[in-house]
């Protein structure tokens, strides 16, 4: 079945991928330009991500980049997918989003995650160990307290600006995180990283346990997935190759490199381990012609009851990437 544009919100997550020999600064400017084009195509939100000391990803300061995107656009909602809360003090995050909300009222989303940095060296540089993620529920509660003006851990301390901010909080979650989102009454952002059956079960539990809050009166589910659309299924599949290779390389060499052209990657002689990781990274995505993708997304929404789909696609050729998003917008 197809997806009705009137019943489904369609949004974009961009990781500010570095392409080939370009600089991180160029990649960040590409993200801002891309956001303008996405707004023209009618998408609902544009989110940016947080990664530290990753050669292939320029997005290291999501609140700052979100400010640049919001300044360059006029209507689309702008936010983070997400700020990794273990890396930051809750008061600082509340103040950052308070500034964003003050400058761009009614347009700011505060997407929050619990991941810590990929390597021990980066974690040491950030002053955070793996155990920082264990305190995520407490950090999240303190952040929401600063935003609502109801925190009690630090009497007399206020988020200025940030208290009573209208920035909308979302929780990027799998597993336990879905339960936290339900308990706090937060919209849930979830990806099928553990398989769609597991994702559907987590969503069901989230809805069953959801407690209305000032942030959301009912459960709200955003399903995040990679989507590639082209004139043929083969061309759409090729769009997935550059990021799949960077993922495979990161898993086998501990470095996520800049994106390379698909043709160059497909001509490589890969080790067995690299090939296995590469094929793993190519699986589980939505790709094909516009009609095929519309049907697949419709089926995904039917299975999950999603209120919104957050689409991501990182490929080497920016023109082909934008064409994929344009084809998707037309298909839905």
Image (cartoon, rainbow, N blue to C red):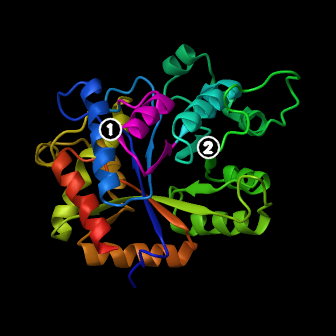
In percent of width and height, residue 286 lies at: 35, 66
Q: Which mark is residue 32?
A: 1
Q: Which residue is drawn at the image coordinates 69% and 53% (left, top)? A: 186
Specify which label sits upstream in the sequence, 2 or 1. Answer: 1
> Which stretch is magenta?
58-81
Residue, disc 2: 167
Q: Is residue 67 above or below residue 309?
A: above
Whether tag 2 and tag 1 are in contact, CB under 8 A, the answer is no
In percent of width and height, residue 229 lies at: 25, 64
In percent of width and height, residue 260 lies at: 19, 39
Q: Which residue is drawn at the image coordinates 24% and 51% (left, top)? A: 241
In percent of width and height, residue 6 lies at: 46, 76
Tell me if residue 13 can be seen.
Answer: yes
Tell me if residue 272 can be seen.
Answer: no
Quarter residue 217 falls in: bottom right
Residue 155 colored in magenta in the image: no
The image quadrant where one finds the N terminus is bottom left
**Structural crowding at the residue carrying mark 1, measured as other residues with C-alpha within 10 Å and reported as few (<14), some (14–19) or many (≥20):** many
Q: Is residue 204 above or below residue 278?
A: below
Q: Which mark is residue 182?
A: none
Which is nearer the eye, 6 or 223?
Answer: 6
**Structural crowding at the residue carrying mark 2, measured as other residues with C-alpha within 10 Å and reported as few (<14), some (14–19) or many (≥20):** many
Could you tell whether 21 is left or right of 141 in the image? left
Label 2 SS: loop
Could you tell whether 62 is left or right of 152 in the image? left
Which is nearer the eye, 134 or 248?
Answer: 134
Q: Which residue is drawn at the image coordinates 16% and 44% (left, top)? A: 265
Residue 69 colored in magenta in the image: yes
Q: Is residue 90 above or below residue 328?
A: above
Quarter residue 11 falls in: bottom left
């Amino acid at each position: 079945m197809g997806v009705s544009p009137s019943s489904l919100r369609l949004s974009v997550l961009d990781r500010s991928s570095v392409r080939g020999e370009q600089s991180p600064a160029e990649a960040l400017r590409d993200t801002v330009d891309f956001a303008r084009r996405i707004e023209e195509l009618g998408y609902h939100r544009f989110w940016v991500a947080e990664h530290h000391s990753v050669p292939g990803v320029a997005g290291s300061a999501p609140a700052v980049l979100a400010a640049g995107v919001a300044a360059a656009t006029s209507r689309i909602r702008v936010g983070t997918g997400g700020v990794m809360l273990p890396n930051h003090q809750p008061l600082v995050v509340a103040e950052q989003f308070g500034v964003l909300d003050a400058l761009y009222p009614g347009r700011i989303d505060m997407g929050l995650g619990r991941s810590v940095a990929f390597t021990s060296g980066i974690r040491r540089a950030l002053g955070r160990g793996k155990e920082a993620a264990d305190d995520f529920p407490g950090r999240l509660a303190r952040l929401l307290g600063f935003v609502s003006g109801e925190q009690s851990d630090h009497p007399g301390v206020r988020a200025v600006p940030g208290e009573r901010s209208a920035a909308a909080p979302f929780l990027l979650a799998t597993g336990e995180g879905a339960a936290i989102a339900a308990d706090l009454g937060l919209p849930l952002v979830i990806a099928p990283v553990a398989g769609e059956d597991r994702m559907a079960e987590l969503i069901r539990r989230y809805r069953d346990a959801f407690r209305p809050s000032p942030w959301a009166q009912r459960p709200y589910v955003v399903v995040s997935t990679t989507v590639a659309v082209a004139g043929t299924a083969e061309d759409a599949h090729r769009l997935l190759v550059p990021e799949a290779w960077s993922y495979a390389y990161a898993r086998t060499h501990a470095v996520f490199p800049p994106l390379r052209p698909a043709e160059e990657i497909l001509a490589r002689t890969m080790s067995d381990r690299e090939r296995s990781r590469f094929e793993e990274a190519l699986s589980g995505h939505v790709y094909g012609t516009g009609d095929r993708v519309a049907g697949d997304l419709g089926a995904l929404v039917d299975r999950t009851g999603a209120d919104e789909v957050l689409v991501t696609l990182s490929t080497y050729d920016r023109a082909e990437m934008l064409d994929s998003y344009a084809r998707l917008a037309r298909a839905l």
